[in-house]
């Protein structure tokens, strides 16, 4: 088993730097969880986002991806900085690295899907009326989530 410290992983030389990064990661984690939860609750429960339903579903997928990234990237990093070493075990370390790549790929693909959908909505407004939330979920799963799981698994 390879052991590393925050000095070798993150290049942090002092406790002050660690404190600064822990504070920053706490702010990122809290703002991400609160903001994405508000987006999901507003769009699912209260139907408060008055946009095309296709775009709202893509925004929901982006919020879920951001929550996943917060819980699997930011939180373990923050815990390791607080403890000044990796304390979550070897299995979580591998999952942390894999989900780091996966969430970045999924987030980029979802944002590309959102932008492409907006362009297609502007270019073909009549045919875009037939786009349903089911089509949006299928598009998000096919374009982002499947690729986000497959691409990191093929890299070695």
Image (spheres, rainbow, N blue to C red):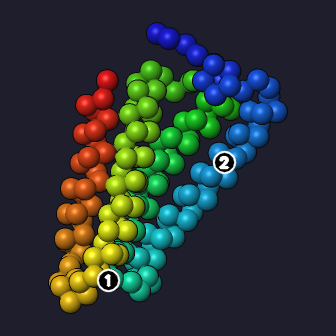
Q: Which of these two is toward me, 117 or 150?
A: 117
The quadrant where residue 79 appears? top right
Left or right of residue 81, residue 89 in this image: left
Q: Earlier in the sequence, mark 1 or mark 2?
A: 2
Q: Secondary structure at mark 2?
A: helix
Spatial distance from mark 1 to mark 2, Cα to Cα? 39 Å
Residue farthest to the front, as pictured: 123
User: What's the mark number on residue 64?
Assistant: none
- Place of residue 155 in the rendered image (x, y in percent of width and height, measured from the top left): 30, 29
Q: Which residue is painted at 24% across and 48% down in the image?
A: 146
Q: Which residue is painted at 31% across and 24% down in the image?
A: 156
Q: Secondary structure at mark 1?
A: helix
Q: Residues within 10 Å of mark 2 (few under 14, many from 20)?
A: some
Q: Which residue is painted at 28% across and 51% down in the image?
A: 145
Q: Is residue 98 visible?
A: yes
Q: Is residue 54 visible?
A: no
Q: Which of these two is toward me, 140 or 19?
A: 140
Q: Relative to 69, say whether 63 is above or below.
A: below
- Place of residue 35 in the rendered image (x, y in percent of width and height, measured from the top left): 55, 65
- Place of residue 75 in the rendered image (x, y in percent of width and height, measured from the top left): 56, 41
- Place of residue 121 in the rendered image (x, y in percent of width and height, measured from the top left): 29, 80
Residue farthest to the bottom, as pictured: 126
User: What's the mark number on residue 122?
Assistant: 1
Q: Which residue is painted at 37% across and 47% down in the image?
A: 105
Front label number (1 vs 2): 1
Q: Residues within 10 Å of mark 1 (few under 14, many from 20)?
A: few
Q: Which of these two is toward me, 135 or 82?
A: 135
Q: Relative to 12, say whether 143 is above or below.
A: below
Residue farthest to the top, as pictured: 1
**Contact? badges 1 and 2 (CB < 8 Å):** no
Residue that mark 2 sits on: 26
The quadrant where residue 85 appears? top right
């Amino acid at each position: 088993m390879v052991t590393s410290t925050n000095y070798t992983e993150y290049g942090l030389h002092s406790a002050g730097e660690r404190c600064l990064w822990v504070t920053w990661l706490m702010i990122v984690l809290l703002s991400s969880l609160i903001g994405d939860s508000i987006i999901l609750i507003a769009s699912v429960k209260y139907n408060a986002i008055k946009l095309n339903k296709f775009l709202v579903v893509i925004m929901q997928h982006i919020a879920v991806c951001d929550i996943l990234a917060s819980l699997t990237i930011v939180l373990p990093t923050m815990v390791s900085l607080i403890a000044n070493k990796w304390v979550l075990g070897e299995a979580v370390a591998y999952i942390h690295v894999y989900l780091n790549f996966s969430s970045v790929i999924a987030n980029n693909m979802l944002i590309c899907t959102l932008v492409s959908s907006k362009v297609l909505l502007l270019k073909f407004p009549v045919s875009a009326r037939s786009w349903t939330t089911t089509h949006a979920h299928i598009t998000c799963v096919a374009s982002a989530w499947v690729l986000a799981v497959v691409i990191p698994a093929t890299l070695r």
